[in-house]
Image (tube, helix red, strand yellow):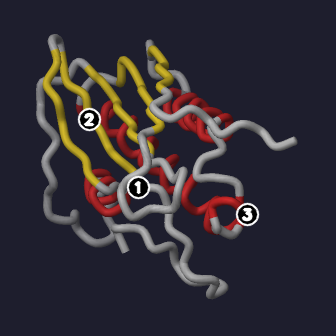
């Protein structure tokens, strides 16, 4: 007997206090949610190879790392992480759902894309990574701070060519 498909529009929240290993906690929290939701779908039903599935999960975790790190560096640290399993978008395989990540903080500043930093110098690329890997992203002002949100589209199989990149919107 097969497992029932996960209910779409699921949401998980993680309240955050203190800077201790916050990036690792957020990555682990999201990895657990994606595993529980079987995102982006089990290999046979989603038409994805194990490698494609792993790349999609790693992209989500990289986005989480970048957003949480930005909150730590520029806004006094994150206060909450939310991950949502979104309904499938038109044109994606049946049952394919995207993911929405929200990182809230107490900072008043609104993140803006900047030109790349000096070659060989660390930093300055977090929003560039978020912009490239997410389907869409933005900022919502909230009482006492803001939330940076990112939407990640469900991956589309590359067409069976070994080693070929996923057909995601950012490529």
In the displayed structure, would residue 42 be above or below residue 104? below
Label 1 and label 2: CA atoms lie apart by 17 Å
Residue located at (25% from left, 28% from top): 147
Which badge, 1 or 2, is on the more N-terminal residue? 2
Q: Quadrant of the C terminus?
A: bottom left
Describe the element under mark 1 as helix, strand or loop.
Answer: loop
Name which quarter of the figure residue 75 lies in. Answer: top left
In the displayed structure, would residue 23 be above or below residue 91? above
Describe the element under mark 2 as helix, strand or loop.
Answer: strand
Question: Which residue bears the numbered disc 3?
Answer: 44
Question: Which residue bears the numbered disc 1?
Answer: 153
Few, some or many C-alpha atoms within 10 Å of disc 3 (few <14, some 14-19, many ≥20)?
A: few
Residue located at (50% from left, 68% from top): 156
Which badge, 2 or 3, is on the more N-terminal residue? 3
Using the image as rendered, state which of residue 50 and residue 42 is in the foreground: 42
Name which quarter of the figure residue 118 lies in. Answer: bottom left
At which x and y percent is residue 35?
67, 40
Label 2 and label 3: CA atoms lie apart by 34 Å
In the displayed structure, would residue 38 be above or below residue 120? above
> Is 115 left, or right, of 66 in this rendering?
left
At which x and y percent is residue 53?
63, 60
Q: Which mark is residue 115?
A: none
Q: Which mark is residue 148?
A: 2
């Amino acid at each position: 007997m097969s497992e029932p498909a996960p209910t779409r529009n699921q949401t998980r929240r993680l309240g955050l206090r203190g800077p201790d290993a916050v990036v690792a906690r957020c990555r682990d929290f999201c990895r657990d949610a994606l595993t529980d939701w079987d995102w982006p779908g089990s290999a046979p039903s989603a038409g994805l190879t194990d490698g494609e599935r792993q790349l999609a999960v790693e992209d989500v975790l990289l986005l989480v790392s970048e957003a949480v790190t930005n909150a730590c560096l520029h806004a006094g640290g994150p206060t909450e992480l939310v991950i949502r399993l979104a309904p499938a978008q038109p044109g994606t395989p049946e049952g394919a759902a995207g993911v929405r990540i929200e990182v809230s903080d107490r900072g008043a500043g609104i993140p803006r894309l900047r030109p790349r930093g000096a070659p060989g110098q660390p930093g300055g690329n977090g929003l560039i990574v978020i912009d490239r890997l997410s389907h869409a992203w933005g900022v919502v002002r909230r009482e006492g701070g803001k939330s940076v949100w990112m939407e990640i589209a469900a991956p589309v199989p590359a067409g069976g060519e070994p080693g070929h990149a996923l057909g995601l919107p950012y490529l």
